[in-house]
Every structure is written in C-alpha cells, then in structure tokens.
Amino acid sequence: MLAGSAFTLVSEQPRTSFPNVYTDYSPMVREIEGGTRDPWDLQFDFPLADASGEAGAESDGEFLYTTQWNGSGFHKYNLDGTYVGPWSVGGVGSIRDLAYCDAEGYMYGGAASATVYVMDFTAQTQVSTFTAPTAVRAIGYDPDFDGFWANNWSSTITLFDKDGVQLNSFPVGVYQSYYGFAHDEWTAGGPYLWGFSQDGNQVLVQFDIATGTETGFTFTPIGGSADLAGGLFTHPELMASGKVTIGGLRQNANFFLYELADGSGGGGGPVGVPANLLGYNIYRDADFV
C-alpha cells in the first residue's frame, strides 16, 4: 500500500489475453483491493449498437457520442439510447476519449498521441489541432482552468490549456490504466477528477484535484466482468433537471448514466479559482516559472 493510500496493489503482470479484437486493452493486468463503492442512482443504461471498436464517450447535452478507436469516425445516439448512426467529423479517426467545452460547442480528443483534435460535431468538421505536453488517451475538460486533464494509460495526469501549455500535473496513484477522465465541480468537497480505470473490476476512481491524490472513493459501473473501461464524462441536467450525470461506457458493451450530484449549469468556461484550491504551478511555454 502506498503511504496515505486507501488502496493496495495485490498483483501486476503483463496482459497476455486479448479475447475481443474490437477492444482497446491496457498493457497490464492489475488487481487492487480497498476503497469504497457507495451506490449512485442509475439513470439509464443501454447496449451499444456498433460494438466494433466503440471506446470513448461524451455528450453535448443533446446527443450521446462514442468514438471508434480502431477506425475513422464516431457513433451518435439520442438521449433515449436509440442509435442515430455512424458520425463522421472530417477525416478524424482513432480517437480514444472525448471532452466537450460547452462555451465553444467543440469536442476535443486524441488518438493516444500528443496531437489534440478540435472538432465541431454539429458541422461535422475538424476545426484545428494543437500539441499537448502528453500523449492523450483519457481526457476531461476543466472549466476552472479552461483546459484539459489527460494521460495515456498510466502516464502522469497532466493539465494543459487550449494552446497545449502545461498548467499542472500529478502522478497516477495505485489505480492506473485510465481510458476516460471527467471533471466534477458539483460533488461536495471538490473539485474532483474522475478516471475510468481498466485495473481490477473496471472502476471509476476519484481524485482530489487540489492535492493530486486518490480520495479512496471508487465505484464499479454496471456491465459484464469482461467488458473493459472506456470513456467518461459529466454533464449537468442531461437526464433530469437539477441533477448532474456522470456517464461513460464499457467498450463495445454498454453505455451507462448515473446521477452524480445535485447541480445545474457549469462546464462552459472559466469560473474563477476553486474555493478549496491549496496552490498551483505556473508554466510559460511548458517551462515552470
């Protein structure tokens, strides 16, 4: 057990079995004990329609989207789970996770490289790209800094702005192998960052952004034991008025939506300094100032 951690790493070994050719597997298999799994209310759950590489997840408040990690394009669903169909955005493909900025109406994502794609899903066009200070698989938008938390499996979790300038970072804890990130400004004591890990039972792991550490809270979303973690997101009033949804998917299996907390609005742009922020780092052109 790491000092100050609520989790214990039981075993770790290279992954040797890849039974579903359409699933994007982490390179390591890790078993972890500890943490809590306090229940949330399940708002909705439905099976994925394509299931040939659906991995990332996000919503713009009107539709639900999944990524095609092993090919071009995306998939679009109505909020009731009905499948709209394949959804192309220029020539963008192989995106893992997605992050949405409501103020712009743009989606952001990476293909496990440092290139971040800026996309207009309504117009179905690629707007631009920029270079992040880390390879981007899991990604979540942080409105407090108008930037993104991202990493690649078990690399350092890094915050950067829309020009790719690094703003902050912290290491993964006991849980690793992340596929999706989601920012949470609504849960008491936050802000928090949630990650969807392929370790253990495929769990959502809560990080305290102010300290850059795991809080000890974990949650296992609905799905089969062989269905691996994919993308993750939060969105206020997506499924119910005055309620915030945390949603995501298990790759090629099911899309899930849970009631995270009470709340409305938010997620659209910078909202000032968080009340419980203990400190921060300033970078200029990726160099610490």
Image (tube, rainbow, N blue to C red):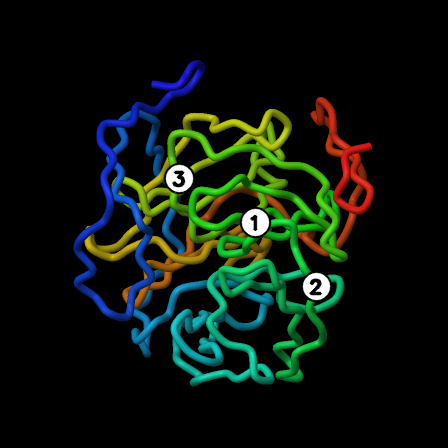
Which is nearer the N-term, disc 3 or disc 2? 2
User: Measured from the top left, where is residue 25 in percent x and y?
Assistant: 30, 57
Residue 130 badge: 2
Q: Position of residue 61 (x, y in %)?
A: 59, 66
**SS under mark 1:** strand
Q: Nearer the viewer, mark 2 or mark 1?
A: 2
Q: Earlier in the sequence, mark 3 or mark 1?
A: 1
Which sits earlier in the primary sequence, circle 2 or circle 1?
Answer: 2
Which residue corresponds to mark 1?
150
- In the image, is 131 to the left or to the right of 240? right
Q: Amino acid at mark 2?
A: Phe
Cα gap from disc 3 to disc 1, whole angstroms:
13 Å
Q: CA distance from mark 3 to mark 2?
A: 26 Å
Q: Nearer the viewer, mark 3 or mark 2?
A: 2
Q: Is residue 130 left or right of residue 94?
A: right
- Determine contact: label 2, label 1, CB under 8 Å: no
In the rendered view, does 213 fall on the left or right side of 201?
A: right
Label 3 residue SS: loop
The number of callouts visible is 3
Q: Which mark, residue 244?
A: none
Tell me which amino acid carries mark 1: Ala
Tell me, yes or no, whether the two marked residues, 3 and 1, touch with CB atoms within 8 Å: no
Q: CA distance from mark 2 to mark 1?
A: 14 Å
The residue positioned 55% from the left and 63% from the top of the image is: 110
Rate crowding at label 2 as few (under 14), some (14 to 19) or many (20 or more) other CA atoms within 10 Å. Answer: few
Q: Which residue is mark 3?
A: 176
Q: Position of residue 187 (x, y in %)?
A: 56, 36
Could you say which quadrant of the image residue 92 lies in?
Answer: bottom right
Residue shown at 25% from the left, 43% from the top: 29
